[in-house]
Image (cartoon, rainbow, N blue to C red):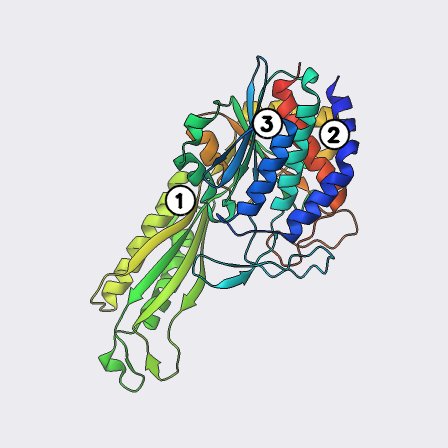
């Protein structure tokens, strides 16, 4: 059986994939809390004949089929703390407790429900048509991508020692462009590295009428925010990409009270790990200096979280898979992306195995459909042909290494 026949057989699971997608969309779970999602995935993989393991909150299914390459395909599975506003009849009504114990609405606002469904579809097709390929296929479903915790959790739980070493690692993401039915990628840096920081400024509270008795963290925080803008403008090579964003500034509760502390939340992006380290170093320097200049008696607390690596695609893998996409999807349905400023933790997995990798995107919105970005409460990709495209892309990429 040829790959074209395998791709045509996906019609057999079209209805099942739609039902599965709607079920997953209606039942999202927060990062590192995806127990029901993982149980559903594991049960499905077992029914296909995969050897499964629960690792670090995720699920890994291994299908051995003779001699040949070993291919790892990753799909992420977590939802986001977003209240859905799509109006769909299968919209999420789920609420969960977050890590702070606060009850929050949950939605698959980034399309991971699409990734799971496509990943399961590819796993089904390879299990059904073993005569067409040879090697080992690893279907890896990863938790906690949204907070850059899932890949690290699986590695900490012994992923590298517990599964066969892949020759190549693959992953994909549903995006707002190109239009549904098309896929795209690029060689080299595709997704930026990123990190978030929390800065706690420790001042001295006082009555608003007695500012001379205070060490005002709001004034100090304001100086920090202003000075941070000079990092990209005056410190980073203008030919290199960098972003420093202050997304939150929280301090005080009343107009006539100077608070004890102020908290800043920052986010940085870069396509170069050296630039990323430069941004982190500059932020620390500025925060410490402004707190000292403002007379703080205690040093500020600076912590880094949601630390995402650079996603930089291997040129050889890109060429091989992109060629296969063109052959089986049609060259008109394959595009080359410009670098994106979103971030991923997928490359932690490939780096841990020391293997080349490829990450690509596929469109989720049909012509004439109103487009809402990932993470929007109205994010609702067209079910068809998005599921078919994601499933086919996963199959084609894997088959480019496993096919006879």
Query: In the drawing, does residue 267 fall left or right of residue 287?
Result: right
Which of the two residues, 149 or 262, is positioned nearer the viewer here?
149
Q: SS at mark 1?
A: helix
Q: Which circle, 3 or 2, is nearer the viewer? A: 3
The residue that mark 3 highlights is 50
Q: Disc 3 and disc 2: Cα gap in Å?
A: 27 Å
Q: Nearer the viewer, residue 271 or 251?
A: 251
What number is the disc on residue 329? Answer: 2
Give the residue drawn at x 79%, y 27%. 8
Quarter containing the N terminus: top right
Residue 205 % position (x, y): 27, 77
Q: Would you place residue 376 above or below residue 251 in this image?
A: above
Say which residue appears at 40% left-offset and 39% top-offset. Answer: 273
Quadrant where the C terminus sits is top right
Label 1 sits on residue: 276
Point out residue 98 in the picture as x, y percentages from the top left corner: 48, 58
Q: Viewer-proximal residue, 301 or 280?
A: 301
SS assignment at label 3: loop
Q: Position of residue 76 (x, y in %)?
A: 56, 41
Of tags 1 and 3, which is closer to the observer? 3
What's the CA distance linking mark 2 and mark 1? Answer: 37 Å
Question: In this rendering, is residue 328 above or below 271?
Answer: above
The residue lying at 57 percent from left, 41 percent from top is: 39
Residue 16 position (above or below residue 129): below
Q: Earlier in the sequence, mark 2 or mark 1?
A: 1
């Amino acid at each position: 059986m040829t790959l074209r026949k395998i791709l045509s057989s996906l019609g057999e699971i079209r209805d099942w994939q739609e039902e599965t997608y709607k079920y997953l969309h209606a039942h999202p779970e927060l990062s590192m809390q995806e127990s029901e999602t993982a149980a559903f995935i594991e049960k499905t993989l077992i029914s296909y004949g995969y050897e499964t393991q629960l690792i670090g909150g995720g699920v890994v299914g291994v299908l051995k089929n003779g001699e040949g390459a070993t291919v790892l395909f990753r799909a992420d599975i977590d939802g986001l703390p977003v209240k859905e506003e799509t109006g769909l009849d299968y919209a999420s009504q789920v609420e969960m407790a977050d890590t702070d114990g606060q009850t929050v609405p949950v939605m698959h606002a980034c399309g991971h429900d699409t990734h799971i469904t496509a990943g399961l579809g590819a796993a089904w097709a390879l299990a059904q048509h073993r005569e067409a390929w040879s090697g080992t296929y690893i279907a890896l479903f990863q938790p906690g991508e949204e907070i850059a915790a899932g890949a690290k959790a699986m590695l900490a739980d012994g992923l590298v020692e517990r599964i066969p070493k892949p020759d190549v690692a693959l992953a994909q993401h549903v995006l707002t462009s190109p239009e549904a039915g098309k896929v795209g990628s690029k060689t080299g840096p595709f997704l930026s590295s990123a990190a978030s920081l929390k800065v706690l400024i420790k001042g001295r509270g006082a009555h608003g009428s007695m500012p001379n008795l205070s060490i005002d963290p709001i004034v100090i925080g304001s100086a920090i925010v202003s000075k941070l803008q000079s990092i990209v403008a005056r410190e980073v090579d203008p030919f290199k990409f960098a972003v420093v964003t202050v997304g939150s500034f929280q301090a005080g509760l009343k107009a006539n009270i100077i608070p004890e502390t102020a908290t800043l939340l920052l986010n940085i992006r870069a396509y170069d790990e050296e630039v990323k380290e430069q941004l982190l170093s500059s932020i620390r320097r500025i925060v410490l200096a402004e707190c000292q200049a403002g007379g703080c008696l205690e040093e500020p607390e600076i912590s880094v979280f949601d630390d995402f690596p650079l996603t930089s695609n291997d040129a050889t893998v890109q060429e091989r898979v992109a060629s296969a996409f063109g052959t089986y999807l049609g060259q008109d349905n394959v595009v080359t992306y410009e670098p994106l400023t979103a971030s991923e933790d997928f490359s932690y997995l490939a780096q841990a195995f020391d293997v080349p990798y490829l990450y690509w995107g596929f469109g989720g919105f049909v012509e004439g459909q109103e487009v809402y970005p990932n993470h929007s409460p109205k994010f609702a990709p067209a079910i068809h042909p998005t599921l078919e495209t994601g499933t086919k892309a996963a199959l084609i990429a894997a088959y480019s290494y496993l096919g006879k």
